[in-house]
Image (spheres, rainbow, N blue to C red):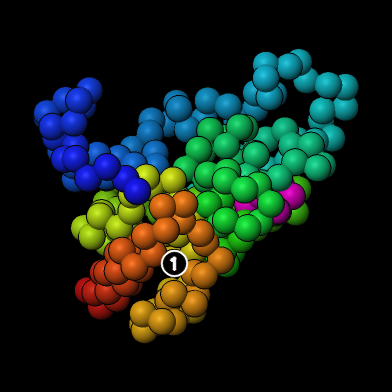
Amino acid sequence: MADKTDFNTSEGVPKAVSRRNFIKGVITSGVAVSSASYLFRASTPLNGQQSAVGVGERLITLNVNGQQRRVDAMKQETLASTLRYKLGLTGTKLGCDRAECGSCTVLIDDIPYYACSVLTHTVRGRKVLTIEGLANRDGTLHPVQQGVIDEQGFQCAFCMPGFIMATVGFLKTKPNPTRQELAQGISGNLCRCQDYDKILTSLMRGAENLRRSNRG
């Protein structure tokens, strides 16, 4: 279980850093990252290796978070690996790497998928959305992200990007779910800390936020 010591007074953490700001930084997973950081590995081979002969055959264009991204992807490369190691979008977490935990969940054409089990080449011509692409360009968080922050619905937060993406995808098909329906809808995501009640409360808050924003 996570230590309940207040973040403001924990050893090694500056007092000026509030718990709320710490939470916001973790949950948004790179929303405020600079464009230079966002693009820093778009065409750089893994591990600094030189491009192999025939690399032109692997160059593809992906639509990620509304941007056309040119990337060198091997035929057997997974979308999770491409997002993290080629495009620098580390909000997509790698947990089990075998389609069991859901920490790598992204939306492909508005449908949640485990990015660790999708080959990069298969998403050409489709729209990929990661946790970094949820917030508005002005920095305003997505209503589900805000709900998680408001309810502090996590402990270590490693799993939260996946939970948020799965919830956003589910709410596109059922915008006003019951608590049980939402639990079933995101049951493919696992939490290491196992505080599911708190997670579900925060995601229900996010669903309510989204309904209000749509009415507005």
Secondary structure type for disc 1:
helix
Q: Position of residue 112 (x, y in %)?
A: 56, 64
Give the residue displayed 45% in from the left and 27% down from the top.
Answer: 37
As drawn, 46 above or below 18: above
Looking at the image, residue 73 sits to the left or right of residue 132; the answer is right
Residue in front for this viewpoint, 109 or 119: 119
Q: Residue at x 82, y 28 (%)?
A: 55
Left/right of residue 139 with respect to residue 131 in the rendered view: left
The stretch in magenta equals: 115-120
Residue 14 drawn above or below residue 22: above
> Picture quarter containing residue 205?
bottom left
User: With 110 as the anchor, is 172 left or right in this view?
Assistant: left
Image x and y of residue 135, in percent: 35, 52
88 and 109: which is toward the camera: 88
- Give the quadrant of residue 80: top right
Type of amino acid at the residue the image marks with label 1: Thr
State the residue at coordinates (30%, 69%): 201
